[in-house]
Amino acid sequence: MAAKSCFDCVKSIESVYTGGCVAASKDEKRLFTTCNEDIFVLDMASGEKIAELKGDTEIVTTFAVKPDGTHLVAASRSMQISIWDLATFKTVRSFKAHEAPVIAMDIDVSSTLVATGSADSTVKVWDIDRGYCTHNFKGHGGLVTSVKFHPNKDKLCLVTAGDDGMIRVWNLGTRKCEAVLESHVSVVRSIDFTDDDDGAHMVTAGRDSVVNIWSWKRRSLLRTIPVYETIEAAGLLATNTQTGLDAGNNCTRIIYTGGEKGVIRLWDMDTGKEIFEQKKELNAKHAFVDVQYLPQSQHLVGITNDQNLLFYKATKRLERVRQIVGYNEEIIDMAYVGQGQVHLAVATNTEQLRVYNTEDLNCELAYGHSDIILCVNVHSKGSIVATGSKDNTALIWLVNMNAPPNQRVLCVATAVGHAKAVGAVCLAQGASCSFMITGSEDRTVKMWDLSPLSSLFDSPERAAAIVSESGPVKLRSTYTFQAHEKDINSICVAPNDGIFATGSQDKTAKIWDVASGKALGTLQGHRRGVWNVAFSPVDRVIATTSGDRTVKLWSLSDFGCLKTFEGHTNSVLCVEFLTKGTQLMTTGSDGLIKLWNIKDAECVLTLDKHESKIWTLAKQHTEAHIATGGADSVIYIWKDTTQEHIDRLHMEEAKLLEQQQALDNFLSVKDYRNAINLALSLNQPHRLLTIFQDVMMATEHRHLLSADDEADDSAQRGQAAIMGSVSVDQVIGSLAPDQLERLLGYVRNWNTNGKFARIAQATLYCILTQYTSEVILSLPSAKDLISAVQPYSERHFTRLDNLLTDSFIVDYTLHAMDSVNPAGMEALTIGNDDSDYE
């Protein structure tokens, strides 16, 4: 395997939702999410970001998408409303709407009007395309928390609700309030209508823990359904939706609710009875802040307060089919999982284990821990994962991404025994995965026997059945001992499962025997805490990283330091062996990724893309891809492009040789047009200078050798050819803008040397006589080039002017010699005449 020297970032997993409004296009192909002061446009199928609508530096409070999908209307804390064209993703119009931020917004079915409810207690209706206010309704006594147009466009009615519990019905035709509906005693969060022709019934829900059903025609309350939880979102499924529930088969109109319990519940609108309540995930702490209904796909999208989007199938007993993680916070640890190594198990500042599909960015959320996960380790098979958490426990997971959604990441065992947070965990490397080593803030190391799980590891289907019946297996520790004087940061088991290493904040790393737990050696030499340890897959050496900004390579024979790698400007946090143990890759608090050759301790590559410290580094078994994550909440996936880079260099060298040969061929046949164009494209200013010099010298030589009359004719022809050849002048006069700019750059450089000044001035004169000033000034770097050429040209002009002045003495001397005949000149003349006579 050749040494690696080049990695390119091919994908990133970053924040797409930080809380706030979420909406989907009517065709359900796009998803719109709030990300701080911006709005992201995501592809619904893949979850990838299509576009980013840049805000006005203030947090987006709400937005709505036209039913026809052409525009998006957004409001921010700056009290501005912006209208975006979703074809070009550019702002069409922006204007101030209210005296306080807009809280609620809705667009009518005709995509003509948008209603905005504000914290200033007013409701306004705007013409979207023309950008002016058509209605201004006043009547609410506090915040306007919800607005909704009646689905029948012929009725021209708007329903609004506030934090005072009052619901008001406004007639847009008469501009008056038709009714005030009083029943809620707290904030009303949702308004929806039945999907029949007249929208005959209206459903409202709020934080007073009730759902009210109203008759639209009589403007009267029909039924109140107590739900016993604060409701943040409610609505109606499409009529006659089959939920897959026995209790709901005969229900034609079903209400869904979501709120503080973090589950979606279904209710029969006609009887008020609860049809179904989801089973809450183990140790899940989230609550729903909104629930979106997607009628085409029959999905209910639950938006949680921890910034996740959970997709449930309404026709399959609300089975969770998909997740989109909006915000990751800090990436603490991660590892590649699965047989194809296309999934990443990620630990962030949450209690959930997140398993990303790196191809389509879909994410599985696994609930099991009750506090933040601190470490992740994966067995060589890729299907067994161990995690350690602040809840003082370690869990064993089985990962099978081909299983049903609720069985893809299954917790099969728990290890309870540490007195403090488990900060390091490592599984056995052998095929059987017979043990696990954990390290804790309580400074102890425990070994756990995994042999009771061997049957579960071999049969994931059997594991799912057993866990569903009796729960996860409780593991027992084989031995426990205090390993260090301070917190244990890292544990690594050797490839042969015979020894393991620990790294600690006490500035040391220690080597231990797996079977007995006996200490074999101590690695001393770091000046600060040891953050990470890693065994070589080939040699009997181990690498350690430290807060002293160094990486050290140690011998396992005598526990001496073999090499020290220096180059990071801050703590080195993670290390991995690459290329069969001949290279190291490290990450640090300086936000840098470095690739080292172990043989000469030289850094051959530095990658700088993260904006903060990089906590973790994960590699595939094939080392084709590397993933890094850190405090900037972004996961970058890097591809090994060393071979592609080498092939590209070889192709470029071969192409350059071909072009060089072509240039020589053009010059040999005096094809100056193609020769000049090729020299410009090859960026060879010296070769181009040589061509101009040869052409001008050849022309001057022909003039000197020609007869007087022919010289006169050639001189006249030479005036037309500035560069000595008409074809050369024509080439310079027909250059593309980028080629012209490049040639002017060459002229600037030539002009600084008096030896080449004549060629530079001739070329500049040729350019100025064939291009207008507008063309030259339109070049991006025209001003810089002109300012650089001018002073040297003035210097050359002054030098030539002085030379011309000095040449007058020669004219004066010759004139004096002609006018004054010195003594002896006449005799010499006569002597010559006599000689000729004789």
Image (cartoon, helix red, strand yellow):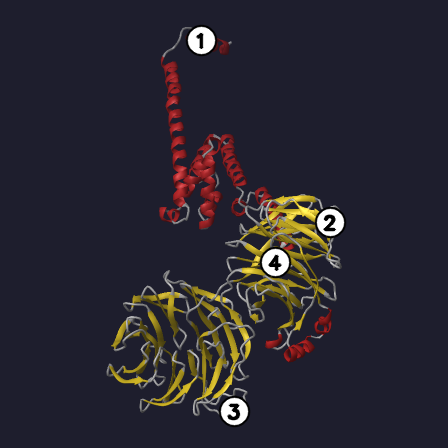
Q: Counting residues from the N terminus, which is met first, the one under dot 3 or under dot 1? A: 3
Q: Counting residues from the N terminus, which is met first, the one under dot 2 or under dot 4? A: 4
Which residue is label 4 attached to? Answer: 442
Which residue is label 3 attached to? Answer: 249
Q: CA distance from mark 1 to mark 2?
A: 111 Å
Which one is nearer the viewer's eye here, 820 or 745? 745
- Residue 517 falls in which quadrant of the image? bottom right
Which one is nearer the viewer's eye here, 822 or 710? 822
- Is residue 480 something that shows in the picture? yes
Which residue is label 1 attached to? Answer: 830
Q: Is residue 82 above or below residue 465?
A: above
Residue 163, percent from left and from top: 33, 76
CA neighbours of label 4 inside 10 A, class few (<14), some (14 to 19), many (20+): many
Which one is nearer the viewer's eye here, 720 or 321? 321
The residue located at (38%, 25%) in the rendering is: 802
Q: Are marks 4 and 3 in contact (CB under 8 Å)?
A: no
Quarter holding the N terminus?
A: bottom right
- What's under tag 1, amino acid-wise? Ile
Q: Is residue 430 above or below residue 266?
A: above
Residue 42, percent from left and from top: 48, 69
Residue 165, percent from left and from top: 33, 80
Which callout, 3 or 2, points to the residue nearer the camera?
A: 2
The residue located at (69%, 68%) in the rendering is: 476
Q: Is residue 695 above or below residue 198?
A: above
Q: CA distance from mark 4 to mark 3?
A: 55 Å
Q: CA distance from mark 3 to mark 1?
A: 140 Å
- What's under tag 4, amino acid-wise? Asp
- Residue 259 falls in which quadrant of the image? bottom left
Q: Helix, strand or loop at disc 1?
A: helix
* Numbered circle sitting on residue 556: 2
